[in-house]
Image: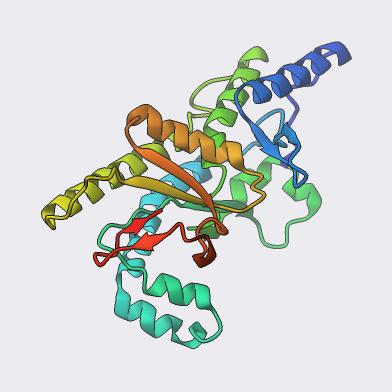
């Protein structure tokens, strides 16, 4: 983390303790939580204050995001390109093979793009200085299409940071803009369900059973509250959408709970 002059400087031990406690209890109140592998409910680790990040680099990342989304969408829709590119891995990576033949008419991407600041040959002292943010370059670390977690919780964590900064007398939307990630993910899912229903109608297929959103989770899921945040956003926009949470075991052949009809519709 960049070591800028701390906003906490000058606070008494008691004031700092109260601030930390209010932050922790706000997190618990608003579902910034997780389960441990032993299924104990604990607060999700988070910083008391947001990490400093240069405004220009942030705005550049925002401007780039739509272009990245379009690029990956076009790549994902180019079947011939994918077959040629993934051919060397098809024999050893069954997951890629399954994805390759799962192309559908309606596609929804919920992605997360990760960035870091980079400066060639920077010393620890340079990285801790203000000059670092002025000279460092924005570098994309990865573009997550599967492990795109924390879109649900992040919306409320930003609200918590905004509140903490306000208590310290330093908040403005210009410095820490809202992050409606859960709301945006929920809106996208609702729109995808609507498009799916239109597709069924155009194909003259029966929609006597309510289409549902299937969320596949692990048997000992720890990131429940992040996922539930997006579910809540979906239901607030359209409470008629059914959401199913199923483990891989629930969907196995042995369970006999999954059927696929001749039109490739999945029934769970």
Q: 42 or 165: which is nearer to us?
A: 42
Residue 139 percent coordinates (x, y): 56, 57
Q: How is the image coloured?
A: rainbow
Snapshot quadrant of residue 191: top left
Along the viewing direction, whichever of 93 and 75 lies nearer the viewer:
93
- Residue at 40 percent of width and 57 percent of height: 68
Left or right of 124 in this view: 209: left
Query: Residue placed at 46% from the left, 36% from the top?
Result: 231
Residue furthest right as drawn: 13
Rendering coords of residue 159 (x, y %): 56, 24
Between 52 and 130, the one nearer to me in the picture = 52
Residue 250 x, y percent position in the rendering: 53, 55
Q: Is residue 202 at all visible to an observer of this figure?
A: yes
Taking 246 as reference, is 184 left or right?
Answer: left
Q: From what the image shows, is residue 246 above or below residue 35?
A: below
Q: Is residue 10 visible in the rendered structure shown here?
A: no
Give above or below for 69 relative to 12.
Answer: below
Which image quarter is the N terminus in? top right
Q: Residue at x 46, y 31 (%)?
A: 232
Q: Seen in the image, is 128 located left or right of residue 144?
A: right
Which residue shows up at 19% across the image and 53% down it? 200
- Residue 91, x across and y down, in percent: 51, 87
Location of residue 176 with respect to 96 vertically, above or below: above
Q: Nearer the viewer, residue 80 or 103?
A: 103
């Amino acid at each position: 983390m960049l070591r800028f002059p701390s906003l906490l400087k000058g606070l008494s031990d008691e004031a700092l303790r109260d601030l930390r406690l209010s932050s922790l209890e706000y997190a618990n109140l608003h579902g910034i939580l997780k389960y441990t592998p032993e299924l104990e409910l604990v607060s999700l680790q988070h910083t008391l204050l947001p990490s400093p990040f240069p405004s220009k680099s942030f705005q550049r990342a925002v401007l780039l995001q739509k272009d990245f989304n379009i690029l990956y969408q076009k790549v994902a829709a180019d079947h011939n390109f994918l077959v040629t590119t993934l051919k060397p891995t098809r024999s050893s990576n069954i997951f890629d093979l399954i994805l390759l033949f799962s192309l559908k008419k309606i596609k929804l991407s919920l992605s997360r793009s990760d960035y870091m600041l980079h400066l060639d040959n920077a010393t620890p002292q340079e990285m801790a200085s203000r000059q670092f943010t002025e000279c460092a370059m924005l570098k994309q670390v990865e573009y997550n299409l599967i492990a795109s977690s924390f879109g649900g919780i992040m919306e409320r964590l930003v609200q918590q940071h905004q509140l903490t900064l306000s208590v310290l007398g330093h908040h403005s939307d210009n410095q820490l803009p809202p992050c409606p990630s859960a709301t945006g993910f929920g809106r996208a899912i609702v729109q995808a369900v609507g498009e799916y229903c239109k597709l069924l109608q155009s194909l003259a297929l029966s929609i006597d059973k309510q289409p549902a959103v299937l969320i596949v989770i692990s048997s000992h899921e720890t990131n429940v509250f992040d996922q539930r945040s997006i579910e809540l956003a979906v239901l607030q926009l359209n409470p008629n959408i059914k959401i199913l949470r199923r483990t891989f075991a629930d969907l196995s052949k042995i369970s006999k709970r999954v059927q696929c009809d001749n039109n490739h519709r999945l029934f769970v």
